[in-house]
Image (cartoon, coloured by chain):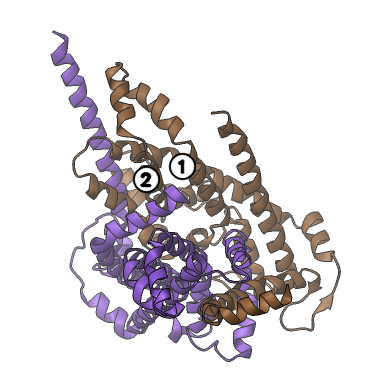
Chain colours: A brown, B purple
């Protein structure tokens, strides 16, 4: 066995040299930091004072005393759910429209996909200006057309999350639309033709041919949408910074803050050990949701 | 008798279709227009809000941003970051993709599984702290190299699989013939495979350039105490937290446009590649 491995390595020196850059990057930038985090889960460490082993105290604190963290978990679910119910149906609908006979198809498609290529952080800053309550253009347009009387406080306690979802949806719809379009194009044209001959209406073809055949693509899109919205915090970080008073704080932003405390106007004490514990729990929550989703969708789609 | 009615209904439905799509396109374009047109307004004009078009075209905003607010430097950093990430991503992932698709070697399955696992396990930006501490030790923390390598590693997995899947569609006879002629693996990769997989290399190049140009969080962490290393995204957003933020909206919009416009120009020429690359991943992946 060992000699065979040796021979394989000797025989393939050039192959190993070619994958070396990839392996080095994996070890230094992915595996090593992961191990570091897994170690500091059991330590109290702020980067200044010497580290101290404290067993599972970080987890005890996280599960029993840290209400802010669990609020951020709750907020993450609200954010992800909100984003999902806005983006997925809308992007599917747009894909169906763009897949039908329509002029300037390529131009519409290119425009709707456009937000995907622009920096989320920069666009969040622009939206921050646009939604500004006293001189933002959104309020001014709404007032001009008499849709509202007084300016809406888009970043207030009640609406900050709605604003965050709107901004996220603006950036995400084009992406999912392309996935749906790719899926729609795999549906053979003959199916529609024979259905048409049988006298099926447009709505019937949509419900009985298109939607069932889109199952696998829908599954991919939903999974991506769930993972991305559970993980995404860049836009919220720039838009609201998690405020007001934690109303839009999401779990990855919470974790980020314990490692890089001085961000914007708020300042916290760094806590690498505790942050590591929160990060691991957060990753587990994300992983569990993904697995549950995969299980449900698998048993569901096996019925067909 | 019924025919004209049916036609009318058809026209009506078509009209609704177009109205819906066009109004959605307007929603998409509006914020971009707001940013780009706003960057030509005076600060007073921006603060007043209301109109989309500037009252007076202030081209000077850009001069001010470049000279007084270091945006010349930020632009340079963004270009370096984008080019560095694109080149290194292409180099690393095309070689790895080739080996995974074509070479039989000990550890191949393990490598594949590890790459796949890293694509799914994510503990977020937490890993930036240990990487930062490591970079301080090897004295790389005063350059953009850590940011380049972090962005490459974060997306490498996707690119490797895209490329190896593409190589799988290239007929094996080509490199088998070359092997019989005595060509070494690296030569086969360089002279046979690379020219044949240009389309997918274009996709990888574009995607990785975009990831780097638009990156905010990685660059933000690594340039917190070193403003001269900031790319455009970080430079723009950092103004928001400055003491003078209220007086600099026009500068922020000019900075935002400097980040947005080059990407839009790239997109104008390559939107087919972008969309094709994404669809490729969706249907098969």
Residue A140 shown left or right of residue B115 in the figure: left
Please, which chain is the residue tagged with disc 2 on?
A
Question: Is disc 1 in contact with disc 2, using a CB cutoff of under 8 Å?
Answer: yes
* Residue pointed to by mark 2: A182
The residue positioned 83% from the left and 78% from the top of the image is: A52
If the image is split into quadrants, where does the N terminus of chain B sit?
top left
Mark 1 element type: helix
Image position, residue A139 (x, y; %): 36, 49
Number of marks in the image? 2
Mark 2 element type: helix
Image position, residue A144 (x, y; %): 28, 44
Image position, residue A68 (x, y; %): 70, 56
Q: Where residue A217 is drawn, which disc sits there? A: 1
The residue positioned 46% from the left and 30% from the top of the image is: A212
- Choose between B183 and B45: the one closer to the eye: B183
Residue A299 shown left or right of residue B59 in the figure: right
Q: Where A273 falls versus A98 (above or below)?
A: below
Image position, residue A104 (x, y; %): 19, 44
Q: Residue furthest top?
A: B1
Please, which chain is the residue tagged with disc 1 on?
A
- Choose between A190 and A118: the one closer to the eye: A190
Q: Residues within 10 Å of mark 1 (few under 14, many from 20)?
A: many
Q: Rounded to the nearest whole Å, what is the CA distance between mark 1 and mark 2?
A: 9 Å
- Choose between B165 and B282: the one closer to the eye: B165
């Amino acid at each position: 066995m060992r000699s065979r491995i040796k021979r394989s390595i000797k025989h393939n020196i050039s192959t190993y040299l070619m994958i070396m850059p990839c392996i080095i990057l994996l070890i230094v930038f992915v595996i090593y930091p992961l191990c570091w985090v897994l170690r500091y889960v059991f330590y109290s460490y702020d980067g200044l004072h010497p580290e101290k082993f404290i067993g599972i105290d970080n987890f005890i604190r996280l599960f029993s005393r840290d209400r802010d963290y669990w609020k951020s978990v709750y907020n993450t679910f609200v954010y992800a759910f909100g984003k999902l119910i806005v983006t997925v149906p809308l992007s599917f609908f747009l894909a169906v429209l763009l897949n039908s006979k329509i002029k300037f198809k390529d131009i519409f498609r290119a425009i709707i996909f456009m937000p995907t290529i622009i920096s989320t952080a920069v666009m969040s800053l622009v939206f921050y200006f646009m939604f500004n309550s006293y001189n933002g253009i959104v309020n001014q347009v709404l007032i001009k057309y008499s849709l509202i009387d007084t300016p809406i406080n888009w970043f207030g306690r009640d609406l900050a999350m709605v604003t965050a979802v709107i901004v996220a949806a603006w950036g995400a719809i084009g992406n999912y639309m392309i996935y749906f379009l790719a899926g729609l194009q795999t549906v053979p044209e003959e199916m529609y033709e024979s259905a048409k001959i049988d006298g099926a209406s447009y709505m019937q073809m949509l419900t009985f041919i298109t939607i069932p055949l889109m199952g696998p693509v829908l599954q991919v899109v939903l999974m991506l949408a769930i993972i991305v919205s559970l993980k995404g915090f860049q836009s919220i970080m720039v838009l609201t910074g998690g405020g007001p008073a934690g109303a839009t704080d999401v779990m990855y932003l919470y974790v980020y803050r314990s490692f890089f405390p001085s961000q914007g106007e708020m300042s916290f004490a760094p806590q690498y050990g505790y942050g590591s514990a929160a990060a691991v729990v957060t990753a587990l929550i994300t992983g569990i949701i993904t697995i549950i989703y995969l299980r449900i969708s698998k048993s569901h789609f096996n019925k067909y | 008798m019924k025919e004209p009615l049916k036609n009318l209904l058809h026209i009506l439905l078509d009209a609704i279709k177009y109205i819906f799509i066009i109004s959605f396109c307007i929603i998409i374009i509006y914020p971009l227009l707001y940013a780009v047109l706003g960057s030509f307004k005076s600060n007073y004009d921006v603060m007043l809000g209301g109109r989309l078009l500037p009252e007076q075209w202030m081209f000077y905003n850009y001069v001010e941003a470049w000279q007084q607010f270091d945006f010349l430097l930020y632009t340079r950093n963004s270009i370096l970051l984008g080019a560095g990430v694109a080149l290194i991503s292409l180099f690393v992932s095309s070689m790895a993709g080739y080996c995974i698709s074509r070479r039989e070697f000990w550890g191949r399955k393990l490598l594949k599984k590890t790459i796949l696992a890293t694509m799914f396990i994510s503990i977020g930006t937490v890993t930036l702290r240990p990487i930062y501490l490591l970079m301080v030790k090897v004295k790389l923390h005063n350059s953009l190299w850590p940011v380049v390598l972090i962005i490459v590693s974060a997306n490498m997995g996707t690119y490797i699989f895209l490329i190896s899947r593409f190589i799988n569609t290239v007929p094996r006879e080509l490199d088998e013939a070359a092997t019989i002629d005595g060509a070494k693996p690296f030569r086969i990769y360089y002279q046979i495979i690379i020219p044949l997989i240009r389309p997918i290399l274009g996709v990888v190049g574009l995607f990785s350039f975009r990831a780097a140009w638009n990156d905010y969080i990685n660059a933000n962490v690594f340039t917190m105490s070193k403003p001269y290393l900031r790319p455009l995204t970080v430079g723009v957003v950092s103004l928001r937290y400055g003491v003078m933020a209220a007086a600099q909206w026009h500068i922020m919009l000019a900075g935002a446009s400097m980040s947005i416009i080059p990407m839009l120009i790239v997109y104008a020429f390559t939107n087919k590649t972008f969309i094709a690359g994404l669809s490729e991943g969706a249907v098969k992946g």
